Image (cartoon, rainbow, N blue to C red):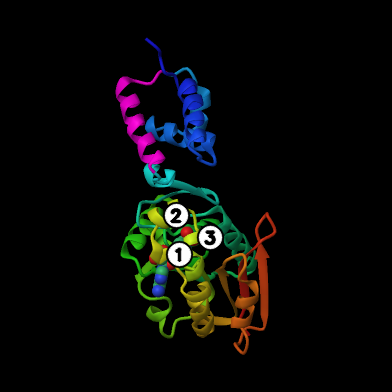
């Protein structure tokens, strides 16, 4: 009888996923297997000859079937690495993307000299942005808001796991509506910004599996970006800033949304591929 060891099944799964068009087959094979045996990726290589038990093999078949039927790997394993931590994620809540780390880096850089910064994260999802920032800035305080109660529950779980729960509060609501009269050193957001017109060009897996409320940004994808620009400055301390992720082709349109608004300094930041990923606007 053939014994399936970790090493053998990794290789087999990588090939299987590759043939089915999965774009990072080795990485996904590692994720699935590590999840199955409750280990981390490194353990797979430290104990490559560990045999899989019959029960593990049959569970693995089910996981693999879910994956090849289009379910994102992160919804199967319930986790996704982002910045320096692992975040819990579940269907109904957007999976954190590495592109959003640009926003974390820029925000951390800008908040450096401020003693006890107060930060608001609008549309927090898993909480990946604000939790990463608070974990790196032990004096900072945060508020996370979302219109989706499920996202807030997941973000709260992540805050507890990453041990920032004492410095982060959560509020259900529509954009900045719950914050009348409140001011912050920074407002950060990765709002829905996919243009209505471009929805069908998104990968099918994203359209069918991830929450459309987290992605669809209305006409030209600018509806939420525009509202945050209009409302944001009222909730910023003098010299505070609004940092938002945006689509890589939205630079000119986003720039024009700032016209006539009290934000004297506007900067765009790009990802490693040189594509514009976010805008940071300082309030006067
Ligand atoms: C692109 S996702 C970003 C999630 C997370 N911040 C991240 O970077 O992975 C946008 C988030 O905004 C939330 N959202 C959509 N409309 C909203 C609104 N009107 N007010 C507050 N949050 C909203 C969605 O539920 C979703 O969690």
The residue labelled by disc 1 is 215
Q: CA distance from mark 3 to mark 2?
A: 26 Å
Q: Position of residue 19 (x, y in %)?
A: 50, 33
**Mark 3, other Cα within 10 Å: few <14 / some 14–19 / many ≥20:** many
Residue 67 appears in the figure? yes
Q: Quadrant of ligand 1?
A: bottom left
Viewer-closest of 229 and 211: 211
- Residue at 40%, 53% (x, y): give it: 158
Cα–Cα gap, marks 1 and 2: 9 Å
Report the disc number at residue 206: 2
Secondary structure type for disc 3: helix
Question: Does the closest atom of ligand 1 sit within 8 Å of the Cβ of label 1?
Answer: yes
Let me know if residue 195 appears in the view. Answer: no
Sooner in the amino-acid sequence: mark 1 or mark 3: 3
* Label 1 with label 2: CB-CB less than 8 Å: yes
User: Considering the numbered disc 2 on the image, is that residue within a helix, a strand or a loop?
Assistant: helix
Q: Earlier in the sequence, mark 3 or mark 2?
A: 3
Residue beneath disc 3: 133
The residues colored magenta run 51-69
Query: Mark 1 and mark 3: span between their CA atoms?
Result: 22 Å
Please state which of residues 48 and 160 is positioned toward the viewer in this rendering. Answer: 48
């Amino acid at each position: 009888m053939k014994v399936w060891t970790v090493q053998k099944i990794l290789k087999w799964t990588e090939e299987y996923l590759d043939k089915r068009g999965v774009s990072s087959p080795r990485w996904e094979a590692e994720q699935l297997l590590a999840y199955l045996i409750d280990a981390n990726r490194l353990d797979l290589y430290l104990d490559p000859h560990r045999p899989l038990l019959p029960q593990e093999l049959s569970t693995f078949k089910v996981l693999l079937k879910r994956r090849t039927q289009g379910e994102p790997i992160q919804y199967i394993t319930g986790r996704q690495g982002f910045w320096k931590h692992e975040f819990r994620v579940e269907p109904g809540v957007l999976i954190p993307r590495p592109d959003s780390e640009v926003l974390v880096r820029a925000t951390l850089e800008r908040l450096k000299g401020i003693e006890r910064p107060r930060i608001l994260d609008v549309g927090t999802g898993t909480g990946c942005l604000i939790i990463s920032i608070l974990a790196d800035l032990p004096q900072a305080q945060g508020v996370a808001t979302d219109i989706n109660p499920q996202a807030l529950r997941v973000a709260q779980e992540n805050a507890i796991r990453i041990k920032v729960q004492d410095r982060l509060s959560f509020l259900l609501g529509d954009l900045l509506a719950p914050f009348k009269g409140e001011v912050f050193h920074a407002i950060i957001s990765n709002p829905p910004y996919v243009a209505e017109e471009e929805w069908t060009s998104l990968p099918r897996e994203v359209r069918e599996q991830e929450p459309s409320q987290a992605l669809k940004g209305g006409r030209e994808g600018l509806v939420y970006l525009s509202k945050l620009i209009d409302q944001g400055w009222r909730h910023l301390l003098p010299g505070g800033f609004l940092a938002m992720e945006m689509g890589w082709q939205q630079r000119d349109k986003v720039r024009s949304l700032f016209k006539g608004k009290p934000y004297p300094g506007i900067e765009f930041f790009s990802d490693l591929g040189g594509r514009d990923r976010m805008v940071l606007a300082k309030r006067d």
